[in-house]
Image (cartoon, rainbow, N blue to C red):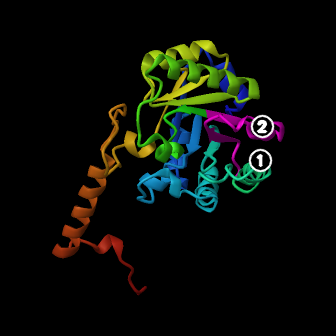
Amino acid sequence: MKITPPIVLKKKGKEKITAITAYDYPTAIAVDRAGIDIVLVGDSLAMVVLGEETTLKATMEIMLHHLKAVSKGVKNALLAVDMPFGSYHTGEEKAVENAIKLVREGNAEAVKIEGVEKKESMIEKIVNSEIPVMGHLGLTPQSVIKMGGYKIQGKTEEEINQLISQAKKLESLGVFSIVLEGIPEETAKLITESINIPTIGIGAGRYCDGQILVLHDLIGLNYDRTPSFVREYANVKGIIEKAIRNYIEDIKTGKFPSEKEVFFLKK
């Protein structure tokens, strides 16, 4: 069954929502065939795929390049994409234009936007352009410079009330779900209970309506520090490295290529 924003909305309180990132064609096929609900082409690709220090290096061109590849592999999941840093910060018209571009050229079925303060009118305009919008509150990586690093949000009573207010504002603007990142479990629970749209957590505890992780963290293909909220379900980098070592050894010992892997003149 093809997952759509209305289907995601209906899952709240009934069934946990599953989400994961993907950045290329083969991994898109893999996560889609596994039955994931939402595939997000995240701007995290700047870090886990391109080796950058932050997500700020992801541009519209980079996001479109990867989105197009992922869209070819996703058949059943809802395909969402991050609007990268700078794509919605220079005016509402440009923001709508970029959102349309991600849908028209990249085949996105939803866009994700970080934050809400001073972005209300822009978010509303994108929603009114018939483009489903996913919100993102808490630790918003595009605000890493302003925040002074990747710090847990929503710890004080003031911060908690602010996040609840922001979530309600996003709901009123018409977003169909909200990613909650890097906030205490208790805070995420209060937010989730205060709105009628689903919350999808990443480092936000057990009481969100769903969960999302970066694919490379989940499968053990991250060569940097793995966040404490990640559960590693495989060690793909170990498998890859072992395969390459075996390949090198077979070349050096003459085992590869063998008779099965060469061509002969026809007799």
Q: Name the residue under label 1.
A: 92
Mark carried by residue 82: none
The answer to which of 31 and 223 lies nearer the viewer is 223
**Local crowd size for mark 2, using a 10 Å CA cut-off: few (<14), some (14–19), many (≥20):** few
Q: Was residue 207 drawn as part of the magenta stretch in this picture? A: no
The residue nearer to you, when weighing 62 against 79, is 62
The three-letter code of the residue at mark 1 reads Glu
Position of 219 relative to 192 (above/below): below
Which stretch did the figure color magenta?
107-135
Residue that protrudes farthest toward the left in the picture: 253
Lateral position of residue 24 relative to residue 177, left or right: left
Please rate how many residues cluster around mark 1, counting C-alpha atoms within 10 Å: few if below 14, some from 14 to 19, many from 20: some
Relative to 165, is 266 above or below? below
Q: Quadrant of residue 151?
A: top left
> Quadrant location of the N terminus?
top right
**Please, what secondary structure does the residue beneath circle 1 have?**
helix
Residue 236: x and y, percent?
33, 48
At x 43% / y 29%, what residue is drawn?
203
**In the displayed structure, does residue 97 sit left or right of residue 196?**
right
Q: Is residue 130 left or right of residue 249?
A: right
Disc 2 residue type (three-letter): Ser
Residue 111 within the segment the image draws in magenta: yes
Residue contact at pointers 2 and 1, CB within 8 angstroms:
yes
Q: Residue 121 carries which label?
A: 2
Q: Foreground: 49 or 2?
A: 49
| Residue 254 visible in image | no
- Rendering coords of residue 255 (x, y %): 21, 71
Question: Can residue 119 be seen?
Answer: yes
